Image (spheres, rainbow, N blue to C red):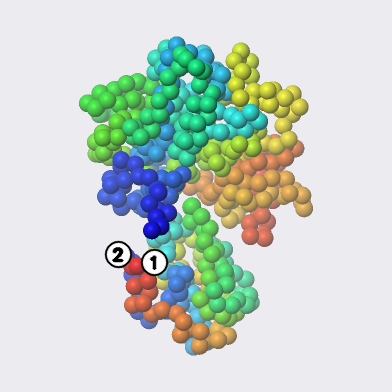
Amino acid sequence: MTVPASASLRETPLAAAHRKQGARMVEFGGWLMPVFYSSILDEHQAVRTAAGTFDISHMGEFMIEGVGAASFLNSLLTNDINRLRIGDGQYSLMLNERGGVIDDLILYRADEEAFFLVVNASKIDEDRAWIEAHLPAEGVLFTDKSAEYAAVALQGPKADAILAELGWPRPERNGIVPARLPFLAFIARTGYTGEDGFEIFCNAASAEALWDRLLAAGAKPAGLGSRDTLRLESCYPLNGSDLSPERTPLEAGLGIFVSLTKEADFPGKARLLEQKASGLSRRLVALKAVGKSAPPRSHYHLFDGEKNVGEVTSGALSPTLGYGIALAYVDAGYAKPGQRLDLEVRGSRFPVEVAPKPLYKRS
Amino acid sequence: MSTSPIPEGLLYAESHEWVKIDGPIATVGITDHAQSELSDVVFVELPKVGKVVAAKAPTAVVESVKAASDIYAPLSGEVVEVNPALETEPALVNSDPYGKAWIFKLRLSDPAEAAKLHDAAAYSKLIAS
């Protein structure tokens, strides 16, 4: 008997809650996830103007602890762990030896020698294998908590007021605090939308209670569709689209999350130093359509006259801005804001312009 | 089980276009079920008037926030009119798929092809399965 493809899709502890809300479920990174409940545009708007909740239980959670944890992570990831006080979070990248991106992640310093890592859903297995292959013989304990944890993001200008009204702790930007809701949770002030907000991690068994309380407090359920348009307006890269094993974080414009001056060596560091010295040949830029255009989509090509100078990696019609926007890799000579290029859509050309990042910034 | 409206008197393609036949002219749009699957439509690419298409040929493109979807000619013919309202108001595809959001009209080259399309009852069964 053959197993249908859908049988291998995983569901989060909130799958039943999503269906109850009328969610349209789609496959994403091996998971069955809500793409929208009512409308991507409405959910996008709710996050920009009020507050939305996203199920992010599909994301992976790792614990790395022990006397050697900090030095191990400094020799595994691009950012400098020593900048983190207890309770601080940091965006970082895990690279292959060629300097290409295996995954981008957030890590939080839970304690002096205990770190909580949040990784992309589609990369959990690959990340775990890479980390285990690089673990030192002793002094560091690695545990994959992905199956035990659920997580919900509360994002939007009203997120802070909602947590205040619930009486839950509100950490500083990028910080994380433990909380009793009364079930044990960790509340981080991080997100992927460009708005103020929180990411709340708890045991899978408590996920529905967490979700229901946020909805009761006035947050609107929001799906992966709006999560994608929100992050794109804010120019946050998506691994697998804008980041890949063939692209370095320097090319992706993520140099501020790479410490080339820290003492620790990490996979890819030599390649990045070399690339920094020799100069980049291509860069990830933000684009905006000039005038009316079909929405840019990944893999569309960019032209200067007849010369192909780049390729879109993410694109959409921006719900907030009302015009087409994209992230694209272009030859370095075409990466300056103001540069005009032509976007090819089904054989037609539409003018676009390289724009400063982010395309949307909250006021 | 779908609760999308499926008007009687129209014909339906398996690729979710509806067709209204009026003598030699067929008006084409997408069904309520299709617009609901696509969600928010943000862009419609109309064919050029005068374009000659075969049945099942990609003829227009409807783009939602998430993706671009081809709209197929349900029948063979020549595009004789397109709906310019969709260029300025693509969301009509969501709000009035069987009315103001008609996409193009064809002058049919082989009206007998219509026998291959579904009536409302058959289309209803198709989307329920």
Tell me the distance, in whole angstroms, between the alpha carbons under discs 2 and 1: 14 Å
Q: Nearer the viewer, residue A185 or B63?
A: A185
Q: Nearer the viewer, mark 2 or mark 1?
A: 2
Residue appearing at x 64%, y 23% in the figure: A269
Residue B114: image x %, image y %? 48, 83
Instruction: Give the vertical position of A222 relative to A201 (above or below).
Output: below
Residue A59's image quarter?
A: top left
Q: Respond whether the residues carrying marks 2 and 1 are from the same subunit.
A: yes
**Residue furthest toward the left?**
A182
Q: Nearer the viewer, residue A299 or A72?
A: A72
What label sits on residue B32 in the rendered view? 1
Q: Is residue A293 left or right of residue B123?
A: right
What kind of element bears circle 1?
A: helix
> Hey, what amino acid is under mark 1?
Asp
Residue contact at pointers 2 and 1, CB within 8 angstroms:
no
Residue appearing at x 51%, y 18% in the figure: A136
Instruction: Give the vertical position of B91 relative to A123 (above or below).
Output: below
What kind of element bears circle 2?
A: loop
> Hey, what amino acid is under mark 2?
Met
Q: Chain of mark 2?
A: B
Residue appearing at x 59%, y 77% in the figure: B54
**Residue furthest toward the front?**
A1
Residue A208: image x %, image y %? 26, 38
* Pointer 1 local density, CA inside 10 Å: few below 14, some 14–19, many at least 20: many
Residue labelled with disc 2: B1
Quadrant for the N terminus of chain A, please: bottom left
Residue A212: image x %, image y %? 25, 39
